């Protein structure tokens, strides 16, 4: 691995940028990082000293997801704090946020189930302005992380299994219900990138035999929690989309599928 400290670096760093870029790029590229230049910029801006930089590069080269190395992920223009053992918000999921805002631009009660880091709820509150925001996850590590991310919006984060985590007084009042459920079919978990397989909790990815176990449970209960005209949105995979739409329709929701080709995002939207 190329030397990372300026003292032993072959390029001579300028006084204003004591942390040398080239060896970082080279180390990342050698480790197989496709966006080595972009990642190097991020690591350089995250490190305050050469020692810190070397530590960050070492963790990235060892395969830790970039977001966990720097401690945050960009999502809808926000910096979302991420922590080890918590699902890293995907850029793709920004499409779900956009769709929710288009469907219910005046929402005042927002619930984010399977919240992970809380990115979706935080982004919705950021766009909507003052709202009553609730997020929930079954995993205490996610709940802790989400609390950091929804604090600015005054959001509350609950621990528990889907709707069981929520205060009962939310029944019939929710304007936007989002659930980025785990939707990878169990048999396809092994095909995920190593970053997801090795560093994200299986429970945040594994959606059962056809990937729709959790989605079906969300669909079945959503109508009881939605306000009249309220909407529920979940992300799904391309091949699962017809079955996901069917699950929403069976729950009595007016259902449609929104697709973003560019980010390969499929979002099922159900309206009560
Ligand atoms: N394969 C999906 C992804 O990595 C998994 C997302 C999910 O299960 N919510 O984006």
Image (spheres, rainbow, N blue to C red):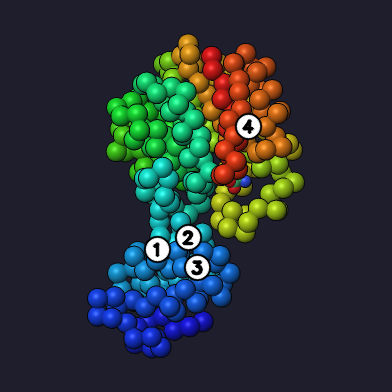
- Please name which of the two marks, 2 or 1, marks the residue nearer to the observer: 1
Residue 63 is drawn in which quadrant? Answer: bottom right
**Upstream in sequence: badge 4 or badge 1:** 1
Of 200 and 35, nearer the camera is 35
Q: Residue at x 67, y 32 (%)?
A: 241
Look at mark 2 in the image and give the residue it sits on. Answer: 66
- Report how far apart the C-alphas of labels 2 and 3 lie in the structure: 11 Å
- The answer to whether mark 2 and mark 1 are in CB contact below 8 A is yes
- Identify the residue at horizontal 40%, vertical 29% (top origin): 134
Earlier residue among tags 4 and 2:
2
Does mark 1 have its CB less than 8 Å from ligand 1?
no
* Residue pictured at 57% horizontal, 44% vertical: 262
Q: Which residue is mark 4?
A: 214
Judged left or right of residue 124, residue 232 is right
Say whether disc 1 or disc 3 marks the residue closer to the N-terminus: 3
The answer to whether mark 4 and mark 1 are in CB contact below 8 A is no
Of tags 4 and 2, the one toward the viewer is: 2
Q: Position of residue 200 (x, y in %)?
A: 56, 51
Quadrant hosting residue 51:
bottom left
Residue at the image position 46 percent from the left and 34 percent from the top: 97
Q: Secondary structure at mark 4?
A: helix
**Which residue position holds label 1?**
42
- Mark sitting earlier along the chain (2/3): 3
Q: Which residue is mark 3?
A: 36
Nearer to us in this view, 127 or 57: 127
Quick check: 15 left or right of 56?
left
Separation of disc 4 and disc 3 at Cα? 36 Å
Q: Is residue 245 above or below residue 264?
A: above
Q: Are marks 2 and 3 in contact (CB under 8 Å)?
A: no
Residue farthest to the front, as pictured? 262
């Amino acid at each position: 691995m190329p030397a990372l400290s300026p003292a032993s670096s072959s390029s001579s760093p300028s006084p204003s940028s004591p942390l040398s870029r080239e060896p970082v790029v080279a180390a990342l590229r050698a480790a197989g990082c496709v966006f080595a230049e972009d990642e190097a910029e991020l690591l350089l801006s995250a490190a305050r000293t050469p020692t810190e930089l070397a530590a960050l590069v070492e963790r990235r080269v060892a395969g830790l997801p970039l977001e966990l190395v720097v401690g945050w992920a960009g999502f809808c223009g926000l910096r979302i704090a991420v922590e080890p053992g918590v699902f890293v918000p995907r850029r793709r999921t920004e499409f779900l946020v956009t769709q929710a805002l288009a469907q219910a631009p005046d929402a005042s009660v927002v619930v984010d189930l399977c919240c992970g880091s809380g990115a979706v709820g935080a982004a919705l509150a950021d766009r909507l302005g003052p709202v009553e925001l609730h997020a929930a996850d079954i995993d205490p590590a996610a709940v802790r992380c989400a609390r950091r991310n929804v604090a600015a919006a005054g959001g509350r984060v609950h621990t528990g299994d889907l709707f069981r985590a929520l205060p009962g007084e939310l029944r019939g009042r929710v304007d936007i219900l989002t659930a980025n459920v785990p939707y990878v079919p169990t048999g396809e978990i092994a095909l995920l990138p190593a970053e997801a397989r090795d560093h994200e909790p299986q429970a945040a990815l594994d959606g059962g035999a056809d990937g729709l176990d959790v989605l079906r449970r969300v669909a079945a209960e959503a109508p009881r929690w939605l306000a009249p005209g309220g909407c529920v949105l979940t992300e799904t995979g391309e091949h699962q989309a017809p079955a996901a739409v069917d699950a929403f329709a069976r729950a009595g929701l007016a259902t449609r599928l929104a697709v973003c080709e560019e980010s390969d995002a499929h979002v099922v939207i159900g309206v009560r």
